[in-house]
Amino acid sequence: MAEIKSCGFLIFRDDPSPSFLLMRHPQRWDLPKGHVDEGESDMECALRELVEETGIRAEDIEIDPSFRFVHEYVVNSTRHGNRPKLKQLIVYLGKLIRPVDILTTEHGGYVWFAWEPPHNIQENTINPLLTELERHWSD
């Protein structure tokens, strides 16, 4: 069982062209995501983090009910004694249904990446997520 759990969203848009949102972290690209608070469901966490990190609200997106990406990997967590911990990441898929001004509060910026698979953005989490999404859409 994972010692750390994080939930978030991969946000997609069609206009002006098919693209997905990633946040600029100091050393990598990342999703709007964060740790689950006590008593919070995975979806509640993902929606809370989405608003906190981007300004995108639940009313701004259409959630794909058939996509839920679950990925486990080892991280060195300074928050947890600076030793390796198993982390579980859960990602939901949301499509923007109206234009939204992105408000970055916890990141150095953001980019809408063109949907042009295959992608090679970040090996640990983003690449496996995008590969799974490509499979999901081709089914």
Image (cartoon, rainbow, N blue to C red):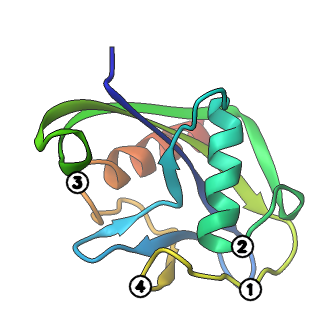
* Residue 55: numbered disc: 2
Separation (CA) of disc 2 from disc 1: 7 Å
Separation (CA) of disc 4 from disc 3: 20 Å
Mark 3 / mark 2, whichever is N-terminal: 2
Query: Are the residues at dot 1 and dot 3 in contact (C-beta closer than 8 Å)?
Result: no
Q: Nearer the viewer, mark 4 or mark 1?
A: 4
Separation (CA) of disc 3 from disc 2: 27 Å
Query: Are the residues at dot 2 and dot 1 in contact (C-beta closer than 8 Å)?
Result: yes
* Residue position for label 1: 101
Identified at 27% across, 60% down, the residue is 122
Q: Nearer the viewer, mark 1 or mark 3?
A: 1
Q: Amino acid at mark 1?
A: Asp
Q: Nearer the viewer, mark 3 or mark 2?
A: 2
Residue 101: x, y in percent?
74, 86
Mark 4 / mark 3, whichever is N-terminal: 4
In the rendered image, the vertical position of residue 80 relative to residue 20, given as above or below? above
Separation (CA) of disc 4 from disc 1: 15 Å
Number of numbered discs visible in the structure rendering: 4
Dividing the picture into quadrants, the one containing residue 59 is bottom right
- Quarter of the figure with the C terminus: top right
Q: Nearer the viewer, mark 2 or mark 1?
A: 2
Q: Amino acid at mark 4?
A: Gly
Separation (CA) of disc 4 from disc 2: 15 Å
Q: Is residue 101 left or right of residue 10?
A: right
* Residue position for label 4: 108
Residue 116: x, y in percent?
46, 69
Q: Amino acid at mark 3?
A: Glu
Q: Amino acid at mark 2?
A: Gly
Mark 2 / mark 1, whichever is N-terminal: 2
Identified at 35% across, 59% down, the residue is 118
* Residue position for label 3: 123
Q: Is residue 71 left or right of residue 38?
A: left
